[in-house]
Image (tube, rainbow, N blue to C red):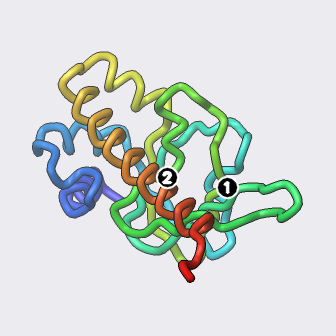
Amino acid sequence: MSQASITEQLATLNFTQDLPESVRDALAKIASERTLAPGDVACREGQSTKELFLIVSGHVGLDMFVPGRGQVRILTLRSGEVLSWSAIVGNHGATATGTALDKTHVIVFHDDDLTRLCQTNHHVGYLVMRELAKAISRRLVSTRLQLLDLFATEKA
């Protein structure tokens, strides 16, 4: 696909839609597109991650290994959400395994290219990291709600 196509898609995704057009253009220059088939693993818990994904369409299940229980689905990601954020925050070990649940179209950023862009253009870097912080914050809230549900006790 073309850079123009990626730029158009970035304008529609929750993660990037509020970014200035110039920032979306800069991101599009270093991005590529990929389609994941159902069952394809985008990142594996504990393994090095070198790519950050923005989901354009489809769904990705996030699973974590829980001793005594095996793989447990903790979240399902959909269009506009970010996957494998570990690639950009310097922690190259994925915190969960991300598996495509259906045909999933993603925009891909290689960690070296995205890091270089953020370091050389601090305006872009700030805005990307701000959006990443928002995404991580939403995941934290979601996890807290799951924990509350898990440990809730019924009132008599």
The relative height of residue 106 versus residue 24 in the rendered view (above or below) is below
State how far apart marks 2 and 1 are (Cα): 10 Å
Residue 133: mark in rendering = none
103 vs 44, nearest the viewer: 44
Outermost residue to the top: 120
Q: Where, quadrant-wise, is the C terminus in this rendering?
A: bottom right
Image coordinates of residue 152 in percent, x first then y, are: 57, 68
Kindly identify the amino acid type of the residue bearing the numbered disc 1.
Answer: Thr
Q: Residue at x 21, y 63 (%)?
A: 12
Say few, some or many: other residues with alpha carbon within 10 Å of mark 1 (under 14 / 14 to 19 / 20 or more). Answer: many
Q: Quadrant of residue 17?
A: bottom left
Q: Residue at x 62, y 59 (%)?
A: 98
Kindly identify the amino acid type of the residue bearing the numbered disc 2.
Answer: Leu
Q: Where, quadrant-wise, is the N terminus in this rendering?
A: bottom left
Secondary structure under badge 2? strand
Outermost residue to the right: 68
Secondary structure under badge 1? strand
Residue marked by disc 2: 83
The reply to whether residue 3 is visible in this rendering is: yes
